[in-house]
Amino acid sequence: MNNEYFVTPQWLSEHLNDENVVIIDASAPMPTQTIDYYQKWLENHIPGAQFFDLDKIANLQTELPHMLPEPETFRQAVSAMGISENHLVVIYDQGNMFSAPRAWWTFKIFGAQHIRILEGGLQGWQQADYPTESGEVSHQPQKFNIQFTPEYVFSQQQILDALQSNTPTQFIDARAEDRFQAKVPEPRPGLRMGHIPGSKNVPWTALIEDGRYKSPDEIEQIFKHQSVDLNRPIITSCGSGMTAAVLVLGLDIIGYKTAGLYDGSWAEWGADNSLPLER
C-alpha cells in the first residue's frame, strides 16, 4: 500500500485480520436526513468494523452538532474501542464520502499516526462482493496517547478576529453554491442565509466522484478555479463542520497540510445576528 490517504476494498480484504488494522464506520446523516446509521451499522458492516458516532464522541456541552470532543473524551472513547495512536485506522461511511473525512480529521487532530479511508465506502466493499456481518463488535481496550494540535481548530472569535484584522487568511465554504449565495434557505431552521464575508465557495461534492476523491490534479484545479491561493492561510467551513473536513483532506492530498477548520461553521455563525455576513 503506497497511498497515504486511501485503501481499496481489495487491500482491506487482504488485511482484514491484521493485528494492527482497526476499522470504523463513521457514517452520519446529512442535516435533512433522519437515517439511524448506528442501526444500519448494526444490521450490516464490514467484518470487525466498529461504529464511531460523530454525534456522541463530541463536545456535548454545546447545542451545536458534532463539535470536536475534548481530548480526554476522545481518548477514552477510542481506547475503549481498542484503538491506539499506532494502529492503522481504516475509516469508511455508508454514503458518498460525506462523513468519513470528518472522522479522518478528528483522528488526525488527536495524533493518530496512520489513518486511511476506504475508497467507495461500504457500497464499494459490497460491490466488490466482499462479506459483511451484523451485530455488536468489541475489541480489547488499548491506550491511545493524545497529541492534540488545536492550532488547526478555529472558533467563532478567531474567525471574527481574522476578519477584523484584515489578515491574508482565506475562508473556503464547502456548502452547495445555492446555500452559499443565499438562494435557498438553510436546512437547519433559524439560520440566516449567506456566508462569512470574503469567503470563497468550493462545494465539497466537487471533489468527490462515485464515493472517491478526484485526482490530485483535478482537485488542485477546482481550488484554483475558485481563486484559492495555495500559498496563503486557509480556513474551511461548511454547515456544521462536517464537510469542511472534506476540503481539509482534499487540500492535504494536494500538499497543503496546514488548513484550519472552523468547527462551529454556519450552524454557529448563521445563528448569531450580530455577526457579519455577505449574500
Image (spheres, grey):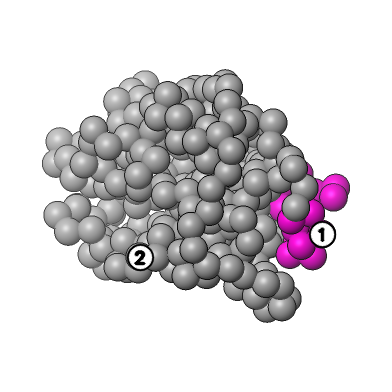
Q: Residue 31 or 216: which is nearer the viewer? A: 31
Circle 2 — which element? Answer: loop
Q: Position of residue 22 (x, y in %)?
A: 65, 46
Q: Residue furthest right?
A: 2
Q: What number is the disc on residue 234?
A: none
Q: Which residue is mark 1?
A: 14
Q: Which residues are magenta?
A: 1-16
Residue 177 locus on image (x, y percent): 41, 63
Q: Amino acid at mark 1?
A: Glu
Position of residue 40 relative to residue 20, above or below, is: below
Question: Mark 1: few, some, or many residues within 10 Å (few <14, many ≥20)?
Answer: few
Residue receiving disc 2: 36
User: In front: 25, or 34?
Assistant: 25
Asked whether residue 172 is in view, the answer is: no
Crowdedness near tag 2: few (<14), some (14–19) or many (≥20) residues, C-alpha within 10 Å: few
* Viewer-side residue, 93 vs 260: 93
Residue 139 in sight from this viewpoint: yes
Are circles 2 and 1 on residues that touch, CB within 8 Å? Answer: no
> Reading the chain from its start, which is encountered first: label 2 or label 1?
1
- Amino acid type, residue under disc 2 in the picture: Asp
Looking at the picture, how far across and down is residue 217, in whole percent? 75, 55
